[in-house]
Amino acid sequence: MSGPLLEARGVSKRFPNGTEALRQVSLAVEEGSIHGLVGANGAGKSTLFKIIAGALPPTSGQLRWRDADVRWNAPGDSRAAGVSTIHQHIPLVPTLTVLENVYIGELSGVFRKAPLLRRYDELCDRLGYRADPDREVAHLPLGERQMVAVAQALAGGASLVCMDEPTASMANPEVDMLFAAVRRLRADGVSFVFCSHFLDQVLELTDAVTVLRDGRVVTSAATSGLDEDTLVDAMVGRALHAMEERRAEPLPDGAPVLLQARGLTSPGRLDGVDLTVRAGEIVGVAGMLGSGRSELLEALFGADQHCSGTVAVRDQPVPHRVGARVRSGVALVPEDRSRQGLVPAWEIWRNVSLPGLADLSRRGVPDHAAELDRAETAIRDLGIRTPSAETPVAALSGGNAQKVVFAKWLYGDGEVFLLDEPTVGVDVGAKADILRLVRDFAAGGKAVVIVSSAFEELLAVAHRIVVMRGGRVVAERLAGETDEPELLALASGLTTVTGASRR
């Protein structure tokens, strides 16, 4: 073989809704190498992974595997060729043992344990790690589950292992264990694509790095020629949208505290988080995947039943229940709008009226005319593009569906708005509308906590930004005294902090 093990040549992907996720992406993974893949959320990393795995076809361009053009029509095709993809949510069966998971492809026949154990021992010698083959995967810590997933890939004959955020929720000893195994396998000829938001880990582990931004390759080079500043600049070098360039107005003097949280702690999720938000204030939460940012919003909303600590609204403690938080004026716009924020099969009017049914009912019976009127008001106020309020939410674009989630809370008694990735999956026009709506909440005296992987959005709308890593708040900055490179460095745990707020 004279060329790379895997090569993407000018790969593009356009979805039916017009979104261009990838634009002429080229990437080459050499045999026996570890290739890093980095970029902000929405850069196109997951789409590229899915194309390599055979889960999505490219719109144009070509994949080459071992010097031959290939077109994989299903994940089974790429696996048969020798490509294994390990997603962040590790694809193991928790009720099966380690041995059964590693050789899961052979469970349909006669499961002969003795010969499989001999093969398993040989596999563990390659990996440099041995998990108890008889232990159920459900009882393994996260680091060991990741190792089992790598063993499963090797058992399936993988020559290339694509790892998507494998260390997102790992402690340092588990990361060290995984890295030692990956290096050992690289020496044995196995190749890896390592996708991670943790730039310090990318620089430590990989041989080469490709940076995606807005669906394009902006940097592809040997890791030895890169440093922290170069990666950060490559990831965030895009010009900001006009709506994002305007910073938040100063917070009024003496604004009262609306939300106060103390000591929020949840096993494996949060570790003693304090947060105070004033009326008219927008607090941004910056962090990478697994940092605890979404978990913080769930705790504030009362959705994490294992969370301890206190939450008060207008100095009144609120019980740790979703219903109690909603009645106190706390509203949540979740990241997964389809699963957590909407009933996709229902019409717009039915979704919009859900939190306010008590106010839209007569003697306990919902007033259909009042529900329709509220939905039509929301369509006008938020610019929701739809033929009518009778349209099922599933038929709307991502941006319009997200506006329906906002509309649910817009006309009630909400005082504290928790927004989790409110602009993910929406087009530029809808994004500007949503950011304008966030500013309107604050202008109306509400308190807003917004999580976003797009740090430039936090800088545009927030008064203050807290940075999370490992379930803790590790830094806090006034939005006007920091910039995107510094936030990225703080969230990634980089030792070098660059940017406006470097002191």
Image (cartoon, rainbow, N blue to C red):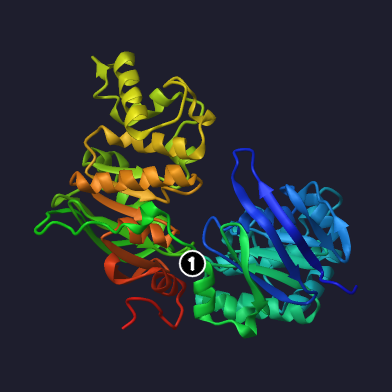
Residue neighbourhood size for the residue with mark 1, other residues' Cα within 10 Å, grouped as few (<14), some (14–19), many (≥20): some
**In this view of the protein, which residue sits in the foreground, 437 or 29?**
437
Quarter of the C terminus within the rendering: bottom left
Q: Amino acid at mark 1?
A: Val
Q: Is residue 17 above or below residue 439?
A: above
**In this view of the protein, which residue sits in the foreground, 285 or 184?**
285
Read off the residue under disc 1. 236
Specify the farthest residue to the left.
Answer: 254
**In this view of the protein, which residue sits in the foreground, 51 or 86?**
51
Q: Is residue 151 above or below residue 369?
A: below
Residue 475: which quarter of the image?
Answer: bottom left
Residue 260: which quarter of the image?
Answer: bottom left
Q: Position of residue 14 (x, y in %)?
A: 66, 46
Q: Is residue 306 visible?
A: no
Secondary structure of the residue carrying numbered label 1:
helix
> What residue is shown at x 87% (from left), y 66% (from top)?
66
Q: Position of residue 134 (x, y in %)?
A: 69, 63
Q: Position of residue 322 (x, y in %)?
A: 31, 42
In the figure, is residue 112 to the left or right of 446?
right
In the figure, is residue 349 to the left or right of 57?
left
Q: Is residue 360 above or below residue 399?
A: above
Q: Is residue 216 visible?
A: yes
